[in-house]
Amino acid sequence: MEMSQHHLKHRSDIHLARKIWHFVGVLTILVIYHNVSRPMALQLITFVASVFIVFDVLRGFYPSINQALMSVFQPIMREHERHSLAGTTYLLTGAFVVIFLFPKSIVTMTLLFLSMADPLAAYVGVLYGRDKIVGQKSLQGFMAAFGCCTGIAATYYLTHNMMTDRILIVSILSGLVGAVAELIPVGKLDDNLTFPVITAVSLWLIFHLFGGF
């Protein structure tokens, strides 16, 4: 089969299979992270990310490898990834950075935001995103991410008895952090990398400012 016969989705498509892959993949990372030691979690994410990166780089040099991988991952890949690094590579790299640098509470909230808010914002943006505010990102997608992240944050803070005396402000700020991280591009970097890193740094600041640690 020729490469041209692989029909891939674009950013403007709903691409439900990719969103399910994203959701299940990030939650799997989170479940493993909570059930093994931190050193083991780092070893596992390093191994998996390294495998993806190696094959992702190799397919740029060897058309036969690219063709084989495109055949396997066609349901979850986008057109712009045909001859560039895949979103999964950036996602695994972002997850590694967050797990390596930040404490458990920050890692947990960041991965929850990444698993749910990011695909939800894209889904709402494609279906209902009439008001563009940054590139192809819409106000509707932004509000979906904000509501999702705020709900996750409030639930996490309440269930862990954290900052409950200021639950409204910290939940709203946390939701805003997730929504802005999903909205704002950082150069030409993939948002699967920038979203978790920006979110984790911002949540860390919120925790320090409002006594979350």
Image (cartoon, helix red, strand yellow):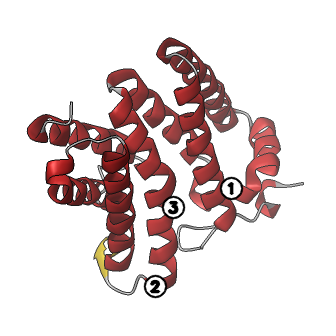
Dot 2 amino acid type: Tyr
As drawn, which residue projects farthest toward the left?
209
Q: Which residue is mark 3?
A: 119
Residue beneath the point at 46% across and 85% down: 128
Of circles 2 and 1, the one toward us is 2
* Label 1: how many Cα within 10 Å (few below 14, some 14–19, many 20+): many
Q: Which residue is mark 1?
A: 76
Question: Quarter of the image holding residue 138?
Answer: bottom left
**Can you give x and y, in whole percent of width and height, for residue 43 in the image?**
56, 15
Name the image quarter holding residue 101. Answer: top left
Instruction: Measuring from the top left, give residue 150's x and y in whole percent.
Output: 31, 60
Task: Find the distance from the CA under tag 3 to the CA under tag 1.
Answer: 13 Å
Q: Nearer the viewer, residue 179 or 163?
A: 163
Q: Quadrant of residue 17?
A: bottom right
Q: For numbered disc 3, what is the local secondary structure?
A: helix
Kindly identify which residue carries mark 2: 128
Q: Residues within 10 Å of mark 3 (few under 14, many from 20)?
A: many
